[in-house]
Each structure stands twice: as C-alpha cells, then as structure tokens.
Image (cartoon, rainbow, N blue to C red):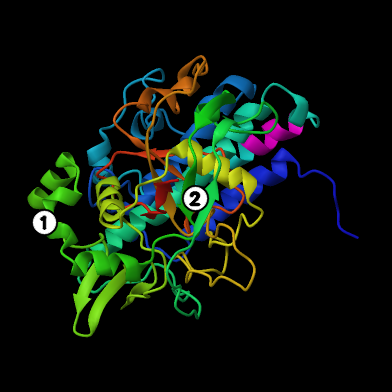
Amino acid sequence: MEDMRPVSLSSLYSGVRDRTQSLVAGLSAEDMLVQTMADVSPTKWHLAHTTWFWETFLLREHLPGYVEFSSEYNYLFNSYYDGIGDRHARPERGFLSRPPHEDVLSYRAHVDAAMTRLLSIDQDIENAALAPLIQLGLAHEEQHQELILTDIKHVLSRHPFAPAAFPAPTSGAGTRAGAPGWVGFDGGVVEIGAREEGFHFDNEGPRHQTILTPFALADRLATNRDYAAFIADGGYDTAALWLSDGWARVLAEGWRAPLYWREGEAGWEELTLHGQYPLEPDAPVIHLSYYEASAFAEWSGARLPDEREWEHAAMTVSRTRDGRFAEPGRSAHPGVTPEVQAGAGGLRQMFGDAWEWTRSAYSPYPRYRPAAGAVGEYNGKFMCGQFVLRGGSCATAPDHIRPTYRNFFPPEARWQFSGVRLARDV
C-alpha cells in the first residue's frame, strides 16, 4: 500500500542537497572553477552560494550557538542581496581559485549538519514560522541546480573538443512531428496568479482577474526542423522580422543560428551536455533569445503568447507533463516532440523540454508587495528590462514547476534552455 504520509521538511532538505551533489558528481574540480561569461557562474560558486543561503537566512538567526564556517564567505558567496552587505563582483567569480573545492565541500557538510540540528529542534516545524523560509531555500537550490546545468554547458561549449558533462543519450527515438495544430481559447474574464495555499514565489501573486481576447496556441513547441526552415529562408538576413534591438544584436554579435548549433560536414550539429551530435529535427529548438523567438514568430505569421494566455491555457489542459525534466538517469536535453495520437488533441509539452518565451514584460501583478527584509530582494527588484518565460525545461527539477511559475531573463539571453510556442489571435 502506498505511503500517503506527508514528506517532512528534513527529508525534502536532504533530497534537494543530495540532488545538487549528484549533478556535479561527474565534473572535475577544474570544470567547476571556470567562468566563461558574466552571466555564467562557476559550479563551485553555485555549490557555495546555495550553502550560504541556508547559513544566512536560517542558521545565523534561528539556530542557537551556530558558528559560521568562515567569516570571508559572506562576502565571497553573496549573490545580489544588498541588505546583507558588500559582495565579490559577479563577472569575477571565476577568479576565486580559493577557497579550494575541498573547502567548499566541507562548508556544505558543516551547514548540512547544522540544518539537521535546526530541523530536529521542533518536530512540528512544518507548521512553524520557519517553514515558508525553508521552502524558499529548497526552491532556491532547485533553481541553482538548473543554473549548474545551463552554466556548465556554456563552459564546456568553449572547449575545442566539445566534451560531455553527462554520458546519457541526448534523446529517444521519434518520428516527424508534422505541422503544429492550434488549440483555441475563448478569452473573457479569467483569474491568474498563485492562490494563497501552497508554496509559490512572491512574484506569482497576488491572484487577480484579467481580460483575455480570443486566442490560440500552437499545440507543440517549435522544433529544430521549424527553425532550420526560418534560417534557410534568410531569417537572420531579414531586418523586417526583427525588433530593432534584436537586429542590432544580430549585426553586432554575428548571430546566424541558435547558440549551440554548429555546421558539420553533413549538416547542422548541436552541442549538448552529452557531447556534439547531429541535430535532431523533431526535438524542440532551444537556446533562443527573446529576439530570435520574436523574429521566428513574425516569420511564421504568428506571435509569442502573452503570459496570461499561457497560464490560462496551462490551467485548462489535462496533459501537463509530457515534456522532459532533469531527472536522475535521464538526458539533460529535450526529447523528440511527441506525435499526436489519434483523437488526442490538446496542448503538448506545456511543461518541460524548453522554457517558453512570452511577449510579456516582467512586471508586478496588481497589489504585489515584496517581502520585508533582504529576502524581499529575491524577485521584486528585477522587474525591469526582462521578459517572462513559462513552463520549465529539460534542466528543471520535475517537482519545481507549476502553471503560475514566472521565470524571467533579459531579451538577449541565449544560454538558458529557452524555446518558443507560437500564438495567434482568433
């Protein structure tokens, strides 16, 4: 008989921390030191920063007698919390050859032991004031698990021989996806945003009403085959398809294809976390900037979804998890787009495989207020100059995503597992 008892926060904590270590088990200390651009953080830094979060927001205030591991770490591993104090410059995290990797692992063990003591103080901590902060810490570490994958992929992409981070295959067998179908929605007055019950980030609420006009979403993600047709038709040479800032990026940075596509002797190849392979035509296209997603949508005679449309659609479909996630023993790469089964219909790949750019600027919902104190810096202060992505990706932990989840990145970002689902007016 299945055990239906709720999982304790102590077990959740151990599971998340163990999963982080499992993601880096195949990497060398040298792999984990490299920083290839300002947006990429070394794996070693991620391991230390997620540990710093537990120490800073829980242990220092709430565990009597806690002794910090090193007085230097608050400066070295603070990310962007001005309320905590000064910090090491983000573009120079790769300069931190010290502390050595062994010390970072000792730091993690030190904090894990202290968290075990904290979680054992009150057996009913799930109902105590600390529970929301612990849940935030778990979600924070899962976000950095995804960043570990995206960042080490960029690091290894700069190696001349395209080494693999993981040995798993890149995708399963599949067949042609065919042309996308369209799923229509009537619009009207709808509610979006997280409800009060259950964990969610502050930027997912408050729940509120909004008005949608009738719209349709493509029933699947755009594929590599779709995007290759855009390239072949001169997509990167046609200024009229692009937003002005995007076209400036194309010219200044020489964009000709998605970030990790390479031209091989037999056609396009793609760099993955498992090495470089021939491009799988029917897998979702990934590593697109907002500008590329927008230009592709324009070329397709469509547009990008509004994030309100996406959430409303995601809440009304039953097939919510047919995409690929970052699970043990599975590939950290999108799977082949599933075929439509006879009579099935509906939206596919709404969750997993690739984050889906929306045309919505990242901004606060009505009546939004950030939390008090330094923890309030988590989301709110970034609500400027970024766009919302929805749905998670093949690098996302499977229990991390939900319909109301709002990811956000600047429009030029390409190193994330970001793709596109088309939308159109009805």
Q: Main secondary structure of the magenta part?
A: helix
Q: Where is residue 54 in the image (x, y as percent from the top left)?
A: 54, 33
- Which corner quadrant of the image does residue 63 belong to? top right
Q: Nearer the viewer, residue 45 or 177?
A: 177
Residue projecting furthest to the front: 426
| Quadrant including the C terminus | top left
Q: Where is residue 27 in the image (x, y as percent from the top left)?
A: 40, 63
Whether residues under marks 2 and 1 lie with C-beta atoms below 8 angstroms apart, the answer is: no
Please, what secondary structure does the residue beneath circle 1 have? loop
Kind of residue at badge 1: Gly
Residue 166 shows in the view: yes
Q: Nearer the viewer, residue 133 or 50?
A: 133
In the shown orientation, is residue 8 left or right of residue 279? right
Count of residue discs: 2
Q: Does the magenta stretch include residue 117?
A: yes
| Magenta-drawn segment | 115-121
Mark before the other along the chain sequence, 2 or 1: 1
| Quadrant including the N terminus | bottom right
Kind of residue at badge 2: Gly
Q: Pointer 1: what residue?
A: 254
In the shown orientation, is residue 323 left or right of residue 8? left
In this rendering, the answer to whether 369 lies above or below 87 is above
Q: How far apart are marks 2 and 1 (CA)?
A: 28 Å
Residue 192 shows in the view: no
Which numbered circle lies on residue 377?
none
